[in-house]
């Protein structure tokens, strides 16, 4: 096992976030997680034990993220790995048919929510002089796809924003746009329907993804990376 790390995961109550939280906890790492489903958070607390912290936080609410960060840093210190996983996808539709409020929700979570978490946790990581920030991207952050234009737009933004941030960090740290590949999650069900079942489950994906993520470091700062074989 690698040295125990403190790993922060947003959107930790389902899909890839939950799979990562469970796997990393089983390997002896300390998990800091957030989500909006209180029942799911309580279930994770019961499953993984009191060493880990799980809080109800809406990443779109900057004040809430600030309070959460202050609590986490006071209790556990700055995270070694910050994994911005929380995201939404729009209901499939041509761009001109996407309602304004739905567009706003996707942008708010997928871009502003990521920045809010970075804003309040990165200074403590910089002060310590180490840490890896992984912003989950997508293949749709590098090429467009019909009827998911809002989601594509946000993932293109994650790619550019993370590469810019990588140039701002001090040596010894990394910001990496990380594409998880195509995984059968609730989000993929929404995007692909029945065809989603043809892809990896989170349980299969985690066998490759978990050790790969733990191996990322300053050498990969600013690189756009995809989980291999996913």
Image: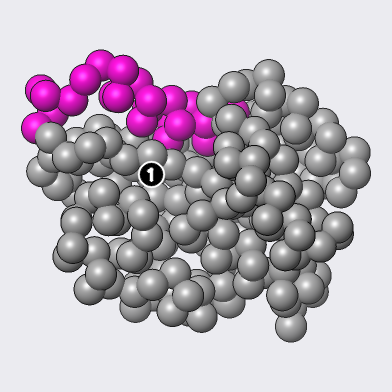
Seen at 76% across and 44% down, the residue is 125
Camera-side residue of 150 and 135 = 150
Seen at 44% across and 69% down, the residue is 202
Camera-side residue of 159 and 28 = 28
Compared to residue 79, the image places residue 158 above or below, namely above
Compared to residue 182, the image places residue 189 above or below, namely above
In this rendering, position of residue 134 left or right of residue 129: left
Compared to residue 187, the image places residue 154 above or below, namely above
Magenta region, main secondary structure:
helix
Seen at 76% across and 60% down, the residue is 46
Q: Where is residue 178 drawn, in percent x and y?
A: 44, 56
- At label 1, counting other C-alpha atoms closer than 10 Å, the crowd grade (few under 14, some 14-19, many 20 or more) is many
Q: Is residue 101 magenta?
A: yes
Which residue position holds label 1? 159
In this rendering, position of residue 211 left or right of residue 108: right
Give the secondary structure at mark 1.
helix
**Bounds of the magenta span?**
94-116
């Amino acid at each position: 096992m690698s040295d125990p790390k403190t790993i922060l995961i947003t959107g930790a109550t389902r899909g890839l976030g939950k799979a990562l939280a469970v796997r990393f906890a089983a390997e002896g790492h300390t998990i800091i997680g957030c989500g909006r489903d209180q029942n799911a958070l309580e279930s994770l607390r019961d499953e993984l034990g009191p060493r880990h912290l799980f809080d109800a936080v809406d990443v779109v609410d900057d004040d809430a993220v600030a309070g959460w960060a202050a609590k986490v840093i006071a209790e556990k210190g700055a995270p070694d790995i910050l994994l911005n996983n929380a995201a939404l996808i729009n209901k499939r539709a041509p761009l001109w048919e996407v309602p304004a409020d739905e567009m706003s929700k996707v942008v708010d979570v997928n871009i502003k929510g990521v920045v809010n978490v970075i804003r309040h946790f990165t200074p403590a990581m910089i002060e310590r002089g180490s840490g890896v920030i992984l912003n989950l991207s997508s293949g749709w952050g590098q090429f467009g796809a019909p009827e998911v234009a809002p989601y594509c737009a946000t993932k293109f933004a994650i790619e550019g924003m993370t590469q810019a941030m990588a140039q701002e960090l001090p040596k010894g740290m990394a910001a990496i746009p990380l594409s998880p590949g195509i995984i059968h999650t609730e989000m993929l069900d929404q995007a692909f329907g029945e065809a989603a079942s043809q892809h990896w489950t989170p349980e299969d994906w985690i066998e490759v993804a978990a050790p790969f993520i733990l191996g990322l470091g300053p050498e990969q700062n600013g690189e756009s990376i995809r989980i291999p074989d996913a």
